[in-house]
Structure formats: structure tokens, C-alpha cells
Image (tube, rainbow, N blue to C red):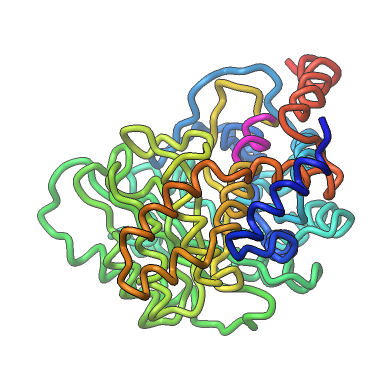
Amino acid sequence: MNVEKSFSLAQERYAGLGVDVEHALKILATIPISLHCWQGDDVGGFENFGGTLTGGIMATGNYPGKARTPDELRADLDQTLALIPGQHRLNLHAFYGEFGGKKVDRDAIEPKHFANWIAWAKRHGLGLDFNPTCFSHPKSADGFTLSHADQGIRKFWIEHCIRSREIGAAMGKALGKTCVTNVWIPDGMKDTPADRNAPRARLADSLDAIFKKPISPKLNLDAVEPKLFGIGSESFVVGSHEFYLGYAVARKKLLTLDAGHYHPTESIADKISSVLQFLPEILLHVSRGVRWDSDHVVILNDDLLAIAREIAVNGFEKRVHIGLDYFDASINRVAAWTIGTRNMIRALLIALLETPLIRTAEAAGDFTTRLALQEEAKTLPFGAVWDFYCEQQGVPVGEHWLTAVNDYEKSVLSKRN
């Protein structure tokens, strides 16, 4: 494979369309993707409660090699990061803390429980993002947390989220990279509620209590995440898109757009430029729903390309925080991370290589040329540029990363019970 020769020919082809390929690659190298820790252990976490997944969370499959300890999970992430071009981030949930075998309830978590994660991230030059874990807990068993009618339960989850923000700030300070702390709750009802208003009023009050203490945006950014429905909350979700959009605009918080949290035919790509008219920054959870919010591994499909295009073509790289959110237990988990992350980066590259002639044609009202160029772009040699970028970044080119994953499975993953 002559990567350099293919790249040179591709670069020449793109130059004829007014695209500076080298500039595109420089921008691409500055865009971090936040990998989600929960792909590596099927959203199990490391609490000592022995509970099962609740809150509409479900990982399907039983592929061997699941990480059972924080050290195993970090080792799997080390292998994954060696296969992905660029410098990236890790997104942690609160129940991935290290509690020394003790039962530390979620309203008592502290930055010290994440000291090993911070040290690991520092060694790798990574940033960390964070999430309170408002599911898979006895106090979320009836499907309500921050909007619960019981004030005592609301207080518990408010304290958990307050502590999560403080942990996020500690991560941001220790690493010198701003942490994004995202609040998602499973609150909702399976069947039609009699009162939709009261839970939402309670949720707004709870969020205000959580965010009351100011934290420097250099250390931590707060995000809130809506959802259309979930397993067990098919008829009513307290934190709907409209609720959190209004809350984010009114309280100056980031809005999280999750690709799996809307109607199956509804793309979050169209929402990006709309929301950014009113908010300085947003968070994305890039996923792939199949018929429902099924969190399949991200593939290079039209939905992903549309999301990447909205970010890259509009110059939103600094305003959009990109995180992944899927968990597939039916295939090798390191491969799942690698496939999804490489596809997200590849989609961004394709968007960065878009010819400016398309927008020029649109501005001139020449929609014939716009459509023609959009279609011609689908067969441009972006693959040669991608291969060059991978080689330049010191990671395997093409499908050769699979060799490393297969070797890792034989030497490490297959030895886990």
C-alpha cells in the first residue's frame, strides 16, 4: 500500500475543488472525541452494591472479555487509544469510581474516588468528562430521581449531582482541560400520567439547587440531556427536549443532543445550528438507534455524516463537545470503541474536505450545481486522505487495526472469566 502516493493524488484532486487538505488535517487533529467508559464493561460500574441495570439501560450480548476492574478497563482503553488517530478524552460515569471495596453511596462520592482515573488521564494527556449516575440504584427503582415526589429522595440525588459537579471541577483543575459534567435522569412513566406539570416543576427546582454554587467554566461546564422516551418511560419523560432546551437557554447551560433520544427518523444534525443560535456551546452524544434508542456502534452512515458536516462546515469545532454513547456487548468491546470512534473522526474529515464551491453555488441560487457537487463528493478519494492521516498519527491504516485487537483478545481478553 503506497499511502503517500495515493494521498498526493487525492490532495491534487481536492485542490482542484478549492480544498486545502493539509489545513483540513490540522483542524481534524484539534477535535477531541470523548470515549464513553461504559462500552468496556456493559454499563456495570464498580460500586459494591451488586445491583442490576435499571432506568431503561440495557446492554445486550455476552461477548467474552468484559472489563471487571478499573485496571482492566483502563488497559482496554489503552489498547483502544493506540488504534485511534488524534488526542481524545474519556467520559466517566460516577459509579466508575474506585471505592476500595467499601460501600460509598452516591451522595458521598468525592474526587479522591477518581484519583486513579485522573492520574491515568494525566499520563496520557487526556481530558476527562463526567456524569452523575442517576440509575441502577435503590433510590431510583421506581423510575424517579430529581423529580421524585419524595423530598428525601430528591435531596439524595441533588447531593449526588452537586458532588458530581465538584468532581468534574477537580478533574478540570488537575488536568488543565475543562470537564463537561452532563446530567441525565431516567425519570418518567410507562403509561399516561395524570399530572405532567408537577414533576417538571420539581425537576426545575432540583436543577436550580444543583447548579446554585458557581463553578469556573474553565474547570467545569454543566450540561443537561433530554430524551423522548425510554424503556419503562414510554409515555412520559419529565426531562423532555422542550423542557431542557428552555432550561438550558434560561440558565445558560449546555444542551446535550443524543442521537438516539429522538424519533427514529429525526436527526440531531438539524438541531445543531438551531440551538447554537441561542447557546454558546452544546454537547453531543453520538449513537446509533435501530428502531429505538438501542445504542448500536456508530457507523459511517448518512446520519453521522450530517452531524459531522454541521460541525465542520460551520466552524463549530470549539462550540460543540463530541462524546460517544453506545454499548454493544455482542462484539469485542475494544473493537466497538475503535470502530465507532474512527468513524466519528472519519466523518469529520469528510466534512472538512467539502468543497466551498457547494456553498458558493447555493449562495448564487444555483441549486443544480449544488446538487451535482454534493453527489460528486460522495466518490471523492477521502479514503486516501484518511489513510494518510492515520499513518501520520502513528496508528494502523485501514483494517490493519483488527490485527492488534485480535492479538489483544487472545493474550488478554480471552483469559478473563
Q: Main secondary structure of the magenta part?
A: helix
Q: Vertical placement of 122 versus 53: above or below? A: below
Residue 282 vertical position relative to residue 294 in the rendered view, above or below:
below
Q: Residue at x 20, y 66 (%)?
A: 198
- Residue 360 falls within the magenta-colored stretch: no
Region rendered in magenta = 335-340
Residue 365 x %, y %: 30, 71
Camera-side residue: 360 or 207? 360
Q: Is 408 on the left or on the right of 191, as rendered?
A: right
Quadrant in which the C terminus appears: top right
Rendered residue at 81%/42% (across/down): 5
Q: Give how far across and how far down residue 292 sits, in percent.
A: 33, 36
Nearer to the camera, 330 or 164? 330
Q: Position of residue 45 (x, y in %)?
A: 63, 40
Q: Position of residue 255 (x, y in %)?
A: 43, 68
Residue 131: image quadrant is bottom right
The residue that appears at 43% across and 78% down in the rendered structure is 279
- Identify the image quadrant of the N terminus: top right
Q: Total label count? A: 0
Compared across the picture, whether 137 is left or right of 171 comes to left
Residue 99 in sight from this viewpoint: no
Magenta-drawn stretch contains 338: yes
In the picture, measured across the screen, residue 202 lies left or right of residue 54, that is left
Whether residue 6 is visible to the viewer of this picture, yes or no, is: yes
Q: Is residue 47 above or below residue 217?
A: above
